[in-house]
Image (cartoon, coloured by chain):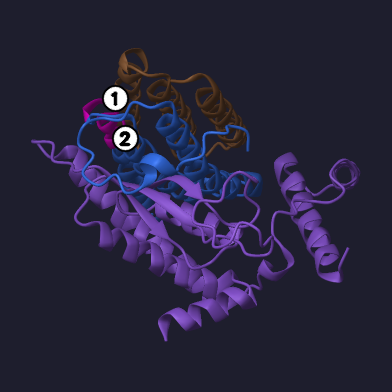
Chain colours: A purple, B blue, C brown
């Protein structure tokens, strides 16, 4: 286990402990002790943690970029709801549904998760399917460059269901915007490099 | 008190969004559209009501519980919606207005277990 | 405060009734699981309105548990749908 992943486990354990104490209400000695016991049990039962990300995709978190991601996301959430409310309450129902393929530059499932969730909570879009990427099932190589090379991961593609579809490209543009913010905030070095190439 | 006014406004706004979610469920033509209506306004509605409750809560345990609710809701609602959406798509049974069904048609992997 | 809270309760209740309609009607299992999930969220909202009304935080922890369990249920049914169809 590398130093970084040990640190991550410790941090996660602290977060779990905090949640445990929060659920019980007060940080009394009893709660803290039972929390520590529970954490120890959890760490024993799941010794390796969620190792879904290959070494090169491990991300680093930049706090300011992360804050930016959350603010953009929060604003998009508000806008989304206004749109949905308007759509639902319109006297004559006017929707145009469609599923748009949004290819991502990144291959990390963590970034994909962030972007997929952000998309789901924002203007008239819902991530329906996720294809490709590292950590996927062995049979799942849609768009792989060369099936023989084990280290080449196919790019992640999000399939996004849109409620009022204007044009497919604007949905893709939204997705890319979120991905750009997510990579800036949480991406790995490889992802950042890839993004630099793409936007150059 | 200002806190009371804020709570009143927020609680009504949040409840209104909950109503919109219900209306959307009934009006919209297919599962996917209904999921849009069920998840987004409901999540924001719950958020607003929780913030309203934050202004009224008397003890710190309540504040902690409210923060937990907000965090849990934001983490679980999009994932839940995605999973149901994916399952519904794979099961088959979308509605007609499929303007752009980009490539998802032949590409998805139906091996089930994740 | 009471006026606002009463209005809020009414709004949420109406939303819940509509959700029930979809729960009964919704042709597929997926429709019904979406309705169930929404119903649970509305339940949490109801508990929240109660706290706004009385300042009493007793039911808030219920909201947390309902949120987590509701999510578990939704995911379970979703996986079922994948395997067995809606």
The C terminus of chain A is located in which quarter?
Answer: bottom left
Which residue is tagged 2? B21
Q: Quadrant of residue B8?
A: top left
Residue A175 seen anywhere in this rendered image of the structure: yes
Residue A50 among magenta residues = no
Predominant SS along the magenta part: helix
Element at label 2 = helix
Numbered disc 1: what chain? C
Which residue is tagged 1? C14
Residue B46, given in percent of the width and then of the height, sits at 43, 42
Element at label 1 = helix
Q: Are marks 2 and 1 on the same chain?
A: no
Q: Residue at x 28, y 29 (%)?
A: B30
In front of the other: C84 or C38: C84
In the image, taking residue A1 as reference, residue A134 lies left or right, namely left
Q: Which residues are magenta?
A: B19-27
- Above or below — where is B29 with respect to B3? above
The CA span between labels 2 and 1 is 10 Å
Residue C50, given in percent of the width and then of the height, sits at 46, 32
In front of the other: A137 or A163: A137
Which of pointers 2 and 1 indicates the residue nearer the eye? 2
In front of the other: B94 or A183: B94
């Amino acid at each position: 286990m590398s130093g970084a992943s040990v640190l991550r486990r410790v941090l996660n354990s602290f977060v779990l402990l905090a949640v445990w104490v929060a659920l019980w209400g007060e940080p009394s000695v009893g709660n803290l002790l039972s929390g520590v016991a529970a954490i120890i049990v959890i760490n024993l039962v799941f010794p390796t943690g969620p190792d879904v990300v290959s070494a090169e995709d491990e991300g680093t978190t930049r706090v300011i970029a992360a804050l930016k991601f959350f603010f953009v996301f929060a604003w998009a959430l508000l806008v989304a709801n206004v749109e949905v409310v308007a759509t639902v309450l319109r006297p004559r129902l006017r929707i145009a549904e469609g599923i748009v393929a949004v290819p991502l530059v990144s291959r990390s499932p963590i970034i994909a998760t962030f972007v997929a969730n952000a998309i789901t909570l924002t203007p008239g879009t819902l991530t329906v399917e996720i294809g490709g990427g590292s950590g996927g099932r062995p049979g799942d190589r849609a768009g792989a460059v060369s099936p023989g090379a084990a280290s080449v991961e196919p790019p992640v593609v999000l399939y996004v269901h849109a409620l009022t579809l204007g044009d497919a490209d604007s949905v893709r543009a939204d997705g890319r915007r979120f991905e750009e913010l997510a990579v800036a905030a949480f991406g790995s070095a490889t992802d950042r490099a890839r993004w630099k190439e793409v936007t150059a | 008190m200002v806190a009371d006014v804020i709570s009143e406004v927020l609680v009504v706004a949040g409840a209104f969004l909950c109503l919109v979610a219900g209306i959307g469920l009934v009006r919209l033509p297919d599962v996917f559209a209904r999921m849009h209506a069920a998840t987004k306004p409901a999540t924001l509605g719950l958020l607003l009501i929780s913030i309203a409750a934050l202004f009224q809560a008397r003890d710190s345990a309540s504040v902690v519980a409210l923060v937990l609710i907000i965090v849990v809701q934001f983490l679980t609602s999009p994932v839940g919606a995605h999973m149901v959406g994916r399952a519904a798509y794979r099961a088959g049974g979308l509605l007609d207005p499929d303007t752009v069904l980009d490539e998802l048609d032949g590409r998805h992997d139906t091996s089930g277990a994740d | 405060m009471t006026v606002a809270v009463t209005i809020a309760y009414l709004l949420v209740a109406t939303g819940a009734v509509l959700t029930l309609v979809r729960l009964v009607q919704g042709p597929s299992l997926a429709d019904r699981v979406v309705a169930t999930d929404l119903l649970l969220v509305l339940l949490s909202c109801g508990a929240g309105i109660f706290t706004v009304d009385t300042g009493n935080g007793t039911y808030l922890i219920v909201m947390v548990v309902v949120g987590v369990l509701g999510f578990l249920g939704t995911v379970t049914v979703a996986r079922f749908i994948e395997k067995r169809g809606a």
